[in-house]
Image (cartoon, rainbow, N blue to C red):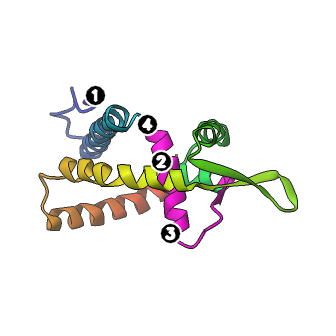
C-alpha cells in the first residue's frame, strides 16, 4: 500500500517523509512475508521468534530468553508471543524451560531442529533484504542508517 498517494505535492516534508518510510517498510515486509510463506511455509512472526532466539544464543544466552524478554525484543504483547511459542514448541522448533524458583516464568530456546530451520531460511531472507536495498550503494545505505539514527533519537524524545 502506497501511503504517499495524495501527498506528493504537500509542502509538509515531515509528513511526506513519514509516509515514505511507512510505504518502504510495508513494501519490504510484504515481500518478505510472501517469500517466507511461499518458500518456507513459515510466517514472518514465527521466523522472528526463531531469529530472536538465534541472536540471543549467539550473544551469550545459551539458555534462551524469558517470554517477557522475547516479547520485549519483538515489540509485541506477551499474549502474541505465547501463541507463537506454543506453535513453535508443537512443531519441535523451540523448547520451553521452567524457571527455577519462579513457576510463572519460562525460558524458551531453539531446539537443534529450530537452529537448522533458521539457518536454512536465513541466507534467502538476507538475499530478499539485499534485493530490496539494491538501488542503494553501500555509502547511501550508511548515510540512510545515519539519518534514521537521528530520526530515531528525535522520535523517541517527541511529545505525544
Which badge, 1 or 3, comes first in the chain's sequence?
1
Towards the viewer: 96 or 7? 96
> Mark 3 sits on what residue?
58
> Mark 2 sits on what residue?
48
Query: Within the magenta stretch, is there residue 53?
Result: yes
Q: Is residue 52 above or below residue 19?
A: below
Which badge, 4 or 3, comes first in the chain's sequence?
4
Which badge, 2 or 1, comes first in the chain's sequence?
1
Report helix, strand or loop for mark 2: helix
Q: Residues within 10 Å of mark 4 (few under 14, many from 20)?
A: some
The residue segment tinted magenta is 42-68
Q: Residues within 10 Å of mark 2 (few under 14, many from 20)?
A: some
* Residue drawn at x 47%, y 47% as measured from the top left: 48
Of the two numbered discs 1 and 3 in the rendering, the one whose residue sits closer to the viewer: 3
Q: Is residue 37 above or below residue 127?
A: above
Q: Position of residue 66 (x, y in %)?
A: 68, 56
Q: CA distance from mark 1 to mark 3?
A: 36 Å
Which badge, 2 or 3, comes first in the chain's sequence?
2
Of the two numbered discs 2 and 4 in the rendering, the one whose residue sits closer to the viewer: 4
* Residue drawn at x 23%, y 67% as measured from the top left: 142
For the stretch drawn in magenta, the main secondary structure is helix
Q: Position of residue 113 (x, y in %)?
A: 52, 51
Towards the viewer: 134 or 11? 134
Farthest residue to the bottom: give it: 60
> Mark 1 sits on what residue?
1
Q: Which quadrant is the N terminus positioned in?
A: top left
Query: Within the magenta stretch, is there residue 49?
Result: yes
Q: CA distance from mark 2 to mark 3?
A: 15 Å
Amino acid at each position: 500500500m502506497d501511503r504517499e498517494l495524495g501527498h506528493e505535492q504537500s509542502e509538509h516534508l515531515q509528513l511526506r517523509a513519514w509516509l515514505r518510510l511507512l510505504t518502504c517498510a510495508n513494501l519490504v515486509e510484504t515481500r518478505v512475508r510472501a517469500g517466507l510463506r511461499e518458500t518456507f511455509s513459515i510466517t514472518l512472526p514465527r521466523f522472528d521468534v526463531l531469529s530472536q532466539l538465534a541472536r540471543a544464543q549467539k550473544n551469550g544466552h545459551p539458555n534462551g530468553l524469558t517470554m517477557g524478554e522475547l516479547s520485549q525484543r519483538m515489540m509485541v504483547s506477551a499474549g502474541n508471543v505465547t501463541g507463537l511459542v506454543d506453535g513453535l514448541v508443537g512443531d519441535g522448533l523451540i523448547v520451553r524451560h521452567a524457571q527455577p524458583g519462579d513457576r510463572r516464568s519460562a525460558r524458551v530456546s531453539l531446539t537443534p531442529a529450530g537452529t537448522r530451520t533458521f539457518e536454512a531460511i536465513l541466507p534467502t531472507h538476507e538475499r530478499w533484504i539485499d534485493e530490496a536495498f539494491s538501488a542503494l550503494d553501500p555509502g547511501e545505505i550508511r548515510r540512510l542508517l545515519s539519518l534514521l539514527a537521528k530520526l530515531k533519537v528525535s522520535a523517541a524524545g517527541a511529545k505525544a
